[in-house]
Amino acid sequence: MVIRKLNKLPKDFISFIRVSSGIAYRLNMKVYLVGGIVRDLIIGRESFDYDIVVEGDGIEFSMKIARKFNSNFRKHHRFGTATVYYRNYKIDIATCRREYYPHRGALPRVSRASLGEDLLRRDFTINAMALSLNKTDYGRLIDPYGGYIDLKNGIIRIMHDDSFFDDPTRILRAIRFEKRFSFRIEKHTLALLKMAVSKKALSSVDDQRLRDELILILKEPSPLKYIKRIQELTGLSFISKGLRVNKDDYYIFARIEKAIELYKNKFSTYRRIEEWIIYLMALLSKLPRNDVIRFCKSFRLRRGEEKRLVDYFEHRKAARYLNRNNIKISRVYFLLYRLSFETIIFLYASSRNKTARDNILFFLNKLTDVRLSINGHDLARLGFAPKKLYSKVFDGLKMAKLDKGLVTKNDEIAEAKKIFRRLKK
Ligand code: CTP
């Protein structure tokens, strides 16, 4: 079947594949678009994964392409793959390969193969299709395993019975595709999935691979439905022992969605937030702090990600002061100003107290950028010493500015003198 979908690709990417096709022809190789992008082209969904496979030497082909376009290029010899950076695109180019798993859950060993075998090693039929980029049959759909029909019927079907054991992250991928596209996991596939779960397949996977899957899930729009389905099919213990979500969490997830919308609409000039971190906070919020730290370590979250998560657990008690009607403005400021926007949004979404929510909104509206007119140089010039007290002086000044309304630089200097005197006593 010739699929006239290739012309739905962005124009500059089409020029890229036209040129690539010429290069492959001269090298006597065959090239194909594969995987998620083929699936997405057929259903008319925008895709950001540009995957090409080559029958031939993928690395040699990629080097020629990179030279032709003068693009950056990175090769990964072990897998016979390379990444070419062309304009805004990151294009993954691989040699067609078969895979062999030395033990379950491990990274596969690979050897060169035909396109048919390359498609066979993939996770689901809907992801096991290719579109020819070759001159002789440009745009032809190669679909040996019935992916097109499954895609049209909304079915997630595994390629072979061992697949969930070979790569148990596919259990989570099946759920992700099922929920993302509102598809259905086919009966036999579901039985295999359940069997793999009952044999504890997920525990053979590196935590970091689980983390990547979890993050992908939390990055989907409305991730709660994915989490509920994971709870139903695998349980959430692979994230943290005994973890469960219940009606309270459903409510909070819904409120987070609204709070994120509010933030994006009203505070669009503020830092871009990482929404998945907020959902992760919600997911972990019932755990003791130590379990959260254990999770961050074993899932190897980046330092900034861990900090934002742990901040919530360290500040949630103090944040209860935000419930108070007569709280001083400076208190609102000092409770929140060191926290990330992700943490603040979570506090906002998870608080059932209207005063607290109003205080948080007040902070976001008015207090994110409280600046003083004087700085450390001014204090030094005026002979304030020792310097180690300066940060406390600035905190005191901000407090006074917010509560007493200091306006001029001279007001601040006078206040700084008082604070210094107090601190030195
Ligand atoms: N793949 C696989 N098994 C995995 C991961 C990936 O077989 N555990 C194959 C699938 O054919 C998939 C392709 O590699 O289509 C590319 O993987 P990836 O980019 O992770 O997935 P996409 O299908 O593009 O999904 P998404 O839309 O979420 O990026």
Image (cartoon, helix red, strand yellow):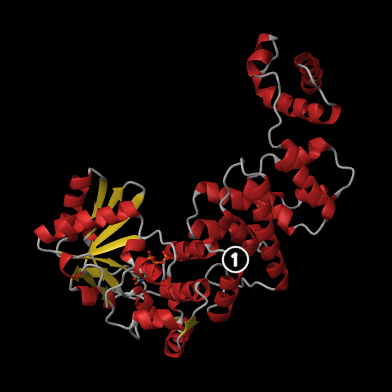
Quadrant in the rendering for residue 260: bottom right
Query: Horizontal and vertical percent for residue 99?
Result: 25, 73
* Residue type, mark 1 in image: Ser
Q: Is residue 276 above or below residue 201?
A: above
Q: Residues within 10 Å of mark 1 (few under 14, many from 20)?
A: some
Residue found at the far right of this picture: 326
Q: Is residue 200 above or below residue 258?
A: below
The number of numbered discs placed on residues in the rendered structure image is: 1
Quadrant in the rendering for residue 193: bottom left
Residue 40 left/right relative to 121: right
Indicate if the residue with disc 1 has its beta carbon within 8 Å of ligand 1. no
Query: Horizontal and vertical percent for residue 304?
Result: 53, 46
Element assignment for label 1 = loop
**In the rendered image, is residue 230 in sight?**
yes
**In the rendered image, is residue 124 in sight?**
no
- 375 and 202: which one is in front? 375
Please identify the quadrant where the C terminus is shown: top right
Q: Which residue is mark 1?
A: 222
Q: Residue at x 58, y 42 (%)?
A: 271
- 397 and 181: which one is in front? 181
Q: Residue at x 54, y 63 (%)?
A: 218
Please identify the quadrant where the N terminus is shown: bottom left
Q: Residue at x 80, y 39 (%)?
A: 331
Query: Horizontal and vertical percent for residue 306?
Result: 55, 51
Q: Is residue 367 above or below residue 396?
A: below
Query: Horizontal and vertical percent for residue 93?
Result: 25, 59
Dividing the image into four quarters, tell me where ligand 1 lies.
Answer: bottom left
